[in-house]
């Protein structure tokens, strides 16, 4: 199974060009979508999820024309938007049963089995009689995944799913996504760059509606190895360093700044060579595009 996006463009009525000729080929497994706010990630995901139209371009899931055959796509799609509402006074088993009925599972016994299996899958079976309003952020997200899994989807889209989750909840949620990635295409947008390194077999960086890079995380990191150097500097000298070096990220530590730079060869000047991390790839890629100051 393969998702092929070609020349996808979208301009909103207010004139914002959210997607500018996006080309991407996405295989089975976990695919990470990285990019700053406003990059076009949600626009891309909503378009793949058949929730909005593109102006031009095409999306094919194998030979299924996603932009034309929307109802076919919806049968095999699981979508977890950035924010979704739950009815607070309803229990997860009742709401899942209701959604399964809407999705066409007419037989009551079949639905009961399906709902039980889904609740087990996302580790919420023991909480099935609690009102959704009492759920933690992580439990709500796992419920969101359960509803997205109702149709045994071949394509799963999750938009910044870990916002508001604590680290343990985030881990559990990612384990679940990894399992799903074994036999489906899972597209995941996130702000947490290192999570893409750990989880995803493939990733893309998008910025201002364009794909800046599409690669495997390990390959991308290897590309920068030998080119990353760091140094602790005083706050007041930052502009000086920016004018001399290609600064890709700046972190405040104990009143001083630690800068990471990209350099073709050892710059000397007190810099220490560092192993590259995916965040370097990310900032290196978008800094040229946006002139970002990353503190
Ligand atoms: P991301 O998910 O990467 O933060 P979005 O796809 O939400 O990016 O947004 C891309 C750009 O399109 C932004 O400039 C945003 O303000 C704009 N945008 C998103 N949705 C709409 C909309 N419905 N109408 C007008 N502009 C929009």
Image (cartoon, rainbow, N blue to C red):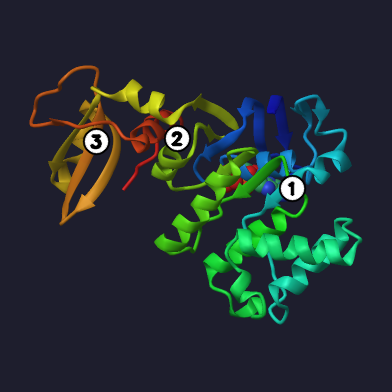
Q: Is 39 positioned to the left or the right of 129 in the image?
A: left
Q: Is residue 99 above or below residue 88?
A: above
For disc 1, the marked residue is: 152
| Circle nearer the N terminus (3, 2) | 3
- Is disc 1 surrounded by few (<14), some (14 to 19) or many (20+) residues within 10 Å? few
Q: Is 138 positioned to the left or the right of 150 in the image?
A: left
For disc 2, the marked residue is: 290
- Is disc 2 surrounded by few (<14), some (14 to 19) or many (20+) residues within 10 Å? few
**Distance from Cα at disc 2 to Cα at disc 1:** 40 Å
| Circle nearer the N terminus (1, 3) | 1
Q: Give the residue drawn at x 74%, y 40%.
A: 47
Q: Nearer the viewer, residue 106 or 58?
A: 106
**Distance from Cα at disc 1 to Cα at disc 3:** 44 Å
- The quarter of the displayed image where residue 265 is located: top left
Q: Residue furthest toward the top?
A: 265
**Residue 23: image x %, image y %?**
64, 24
For disc 3, the marked residue is: 260
């Amino acid at each position: 199974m393969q998702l092929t996006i070609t020349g996808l463009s979208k301009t909103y009525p207010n004139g914002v060009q959210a997607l500018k000729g996006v080309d991407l080929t996405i295989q089975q497994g976990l695919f990470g979508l990285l990019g700053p706010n406003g990059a076009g990630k949600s626009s891309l995901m909503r378009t793949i999820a058949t929730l909005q139209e593109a102006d031009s371009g095409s999306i094919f899931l194998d030979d299924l024309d996603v932009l034309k055959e929307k109802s076919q796509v919806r049968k095999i799609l699981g979508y977890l938007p950035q924010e979704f509402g739950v009815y607070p006074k309803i229990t997860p088993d009742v709401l899942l049963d209701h959604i399964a009925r809407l999705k066409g599972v007419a037989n009551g016994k079949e639905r009961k089995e399906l709902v039980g299996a889904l609740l087990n899958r996302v580790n919420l079976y023991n909480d099935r009689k609690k009102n959704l309003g009492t759920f933690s952020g992580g439990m709500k997200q796992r419920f969101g995944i359960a509803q997205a899994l109702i149709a045994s989807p071949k394509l799963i889209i999750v938009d910044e799913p870990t916002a508001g989750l604590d680290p343990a909840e985030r881990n559990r949620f990612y384990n679940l996504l990894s399992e799903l990635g074994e036999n489906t295409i899972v597209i995941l947008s996130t702000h947490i760059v290192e999570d893409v390194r750990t989880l995803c077999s493939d990733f893309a960086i998008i910025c201002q509606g364009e794909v800046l890079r599409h690669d495997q995380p390990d390959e991308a990191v290897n590309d920068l190895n030998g080119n990353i150097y760091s140094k602790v500097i005083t706050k007041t000298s930052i502009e000086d360093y920016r004018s001399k070096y290609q600064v890709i990220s700046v972190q405040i530590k104990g009143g001083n700044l630690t800068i990471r730079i990209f350099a073709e060869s050892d710059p000397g000047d007190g810099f220490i060579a560092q192993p590259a991390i995916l965040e370097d790839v990310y900032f290196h890629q978008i800094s040229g595009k946006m002139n970002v100051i990353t503190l």
